[in-house]
Image: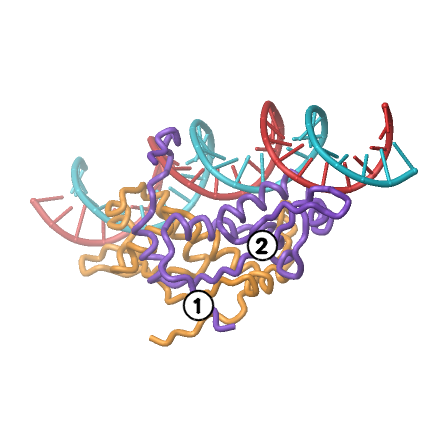
Chain colours: A orange, B purple, C red, D cyan
Amino acid sequence: MAEVPHPAPTGDELLKVLSALGNPHRMRIVAALQERRNYVSALAREIGMGRPLLHMHLQRLEAAGLVVGTLELAEDGKAMKYYEVAPFFYELTPHVVARAAATITETTARTAKEETK
Amino acid sequence: MAEVPHPAPTGDELLKVLSALGNPHRMRIVAALQERRNYVSALAREIGMGRPLLHMHLQRLEAAGLVVGTLELAEDGKAMKYYEVAPFFYELTPHVVARAAATITETTARTAKEETK
DNA sequence: CTCGCCTGTCAGCCTTTTCTGACAGGTACG
DNA sequence: CGTACCTGTCAGAAAAGGCTGACAGGCGAG
């Protein structure tokens, strides 16, 4: 169990992780998936949330690398997307934050059309 | 330097911390204060930000317990509020998140007038 | 008394997030 | 073929956050 903390996270990376986890619903989603992996519809019913909304939250969590989704074919041929938590480990200290802050891609308010690269 | 990580954060507490740190500006504010404590107006000039806005961000950070503000009297009698980072240390793992998620005060969409206690 | 620098707050605008309802496609079962 | 369950996406409403300019008070120096 001696997990090693994530070295020095990028500003953008840490930003995505924190803003993803800084939401009550998403936090509960992680908690639910922590107990057992589940597919979207079932999870939606379990935590009482609309599918479209849950879908959005899961995407956000996956984009931050906190959960992973896998599209699987059930025996009866139905396609179901199972999600499970990823084994993340971040340390949150002033030093880490300061370090990360220095590497933030100023994507603020940009028209988003100037996606260089 | 053997700092000990924060035990088991409350859902609300962790939520405040994460949503506070999950913002590029606030992250940079922490970074700036990490180098040296500073007072509001000077800090505002340093990171190029309006005073009212910075004030709001600082409040959010302070509410999360990440920075502390102290109103001090300068030699010439001027009142200046100095801010500095608090020595926080949070561990971010699926387990911690799941644990915290269970203790979330469902303040969602509540009229906020029913602030019991 | 006016200027400069400090503190704070408030109303209002604007952008981003969050959330909902409706739609479309797929496979299996009666 | 109609029903039931799965998947996804999109437009548009509703709410939350971020941001700005203006205002008010305090103290010291010229």
Q: Are marks 1 and 2 in contact (CB under 8 Å)?
A: no
The kind of residue tagged 1 is Val
Q: Is residue A3 above or below residue A44?
A: below
Q: In the figure, is residue A26 to the left or right of A34?
A: right
Query: Regarding mark 2 in the picture, which secondary structure is present there?
Result: helix
Could you tell me which residue is drawn at 52 percent across and 53 percent down? B66
The chain holding disc 1 is B
| Residue identifier under label 1 | B4
Which of discs 1 and 2 lies nearer the camera? The answer is 1
Q: Position of residue B113 (x, y in %)?
A: 38, 29
Q: Could you say which quadrant of the image residue A78 lies in?
A: bottom left
The kind of residue tagged 2 is Met
Number of numbered tags placed on the structure image = 2
Q: Residue furthest bottom?
A: A2
| Residue identifier under label 2 | B27
Q: Position of residue A98 (x, y in %)?
A: 60, 61
Could you tell me which residue is drawn at 55 percent across and 50 percent down? B23
The chain holding disc 2 is B
B43 and C27: which is toward the camera: B43
